[in-house]
Image (cartoon, rainbow, N blue to C red):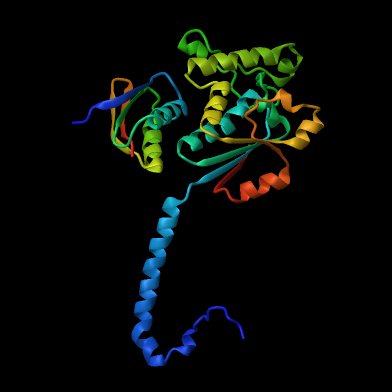
Amino acid sequence: MSNTAKVISSAQFPSDMLTQYGPALDAWFDQRFIQKTKELEESKIPALAIIATKGTMDWAYPPFILASTASALGWDVSVFFTFYGLELLKKELHLEVSPLGNPGMPMKMPFGPKWFKGINWNIPNAVMASVPGFEKIATGLMKKTVKNNGVATIDELREACIESGVNLVACQMTVDLFGYTHADFIPEVKDWIGAATFLPIAQKSDVCLFI
Amino acid sequence: MTTTAQEVDARGLNCPLPILRARKALNGLQQGQLLQVRATDPGAVKDFDAFCKQTGNELVSSSQTGGEYIFQIRKN
């Protein structure tokens, strides 16, 4: 004999009672269910989990913009930095942008009159690859463009993430793989973890992005 | 008629900075106090609407004068 609470099946109700009260009970349950679901949804804090895997200046924007904004919206945010993404957590950021192998990237000048700024310098990959320091120039131009347009720097966005309590976690395996030490990175890294620790965080999130 | 408790000048700043600055300012306010944000980013119009809906703060007004957008937000 089990002592657990009995689940009453409809078969145990006298059929006349079911006919009399069944529809009202159903309606009551449906109404309560909708009300409770709504209450739960409204009280739930949304969670965002981002996997940041790229270490260039252009690819540094999406994770930091989304994380800082989600945090401003009151969401619970975690960012897992792995592989080249670890560059984004270095104490000194030296992020560069590369037009090489990136045909979607417009090459525009951030100075001069409007018509000049509007020109897209269609430089062939072969030329970009053979000019020494081309990436340094592209990075400089990108930084200038960012500044001209009132777009935040990566440092600013990272600071905003730290201030608003974004959970910044990093991949321990990458540290070993690339021969880094924890001292290379900002002390705000909350934890050094592996895939098995991040996946449960991702599982509980409402939005999970691989960047 | 309520007076503005704090103003944020987000002119010249682009997405998501106006929202981040507003969030920071709201954190320092008390419930019922009014925050005014000035911005020039056209994307801020939709962003402040969404921000207020999501955070439960009241977007009292959202207006445009010249090339500037002015948002008034009551902290909830």
- The single residue placed furthest to the left in the displayed view is B1
Residue A183, quarter of the rendered image: top right
Confirm whether residue A187 shows in the render: yes
Q: Residue at x 76, y 34 (%)?
A: A174
Q: Residue at x 47, y 19 (%)?
A: A150
The N terminus of chain A appears in which quarter of the rendering?
bottom right
The answer to which of A158 and A128 lies nearer the viewer is: A158
Please state if A93 lies on the left or on the right of A174 as rendered: left
Would residue A136 appear left or right of A13 to someone viewing this image? right
Residue at the image position 54 percent from the left and 48 percent from the top: A206
Q: Report which quarter residue A31 is drawn in.
A: bottom left
Q: Left or right: A155 with respect to B11?
A: right
> Residue B31 at what x, y percent from top left?
32, 37
| Residue A67: percent from left, percent from top | 54, 35
Instruction: Report the residue at 37% width, 38% height from top.
Output: B52
Asked whether residue A104 is in view, the answer is no
- Left or right: A198, with A116 as reference point: right
Q: Vertical placement of A17 versus A115: above or below?
A: below
Farthest residue to the top: give it. A112
Quadrant location of residue A83?
top right
Q: Nearer the viewer, residue B44 or A121?
A: B44
Identify whether A204 is placed above or below A10: above
Rendered position, A117 above or below A15:
above
The image shows residue A163, relative to residue A146, as above or below, that is below
Residue A111, horizontal then vertical, whole percent:
52, 9
**Residue A106: image x %, image y %?**
59, 22
Q: Which image quarter holds the C terminus of chain A? A: top right
Total numbered labels? 0
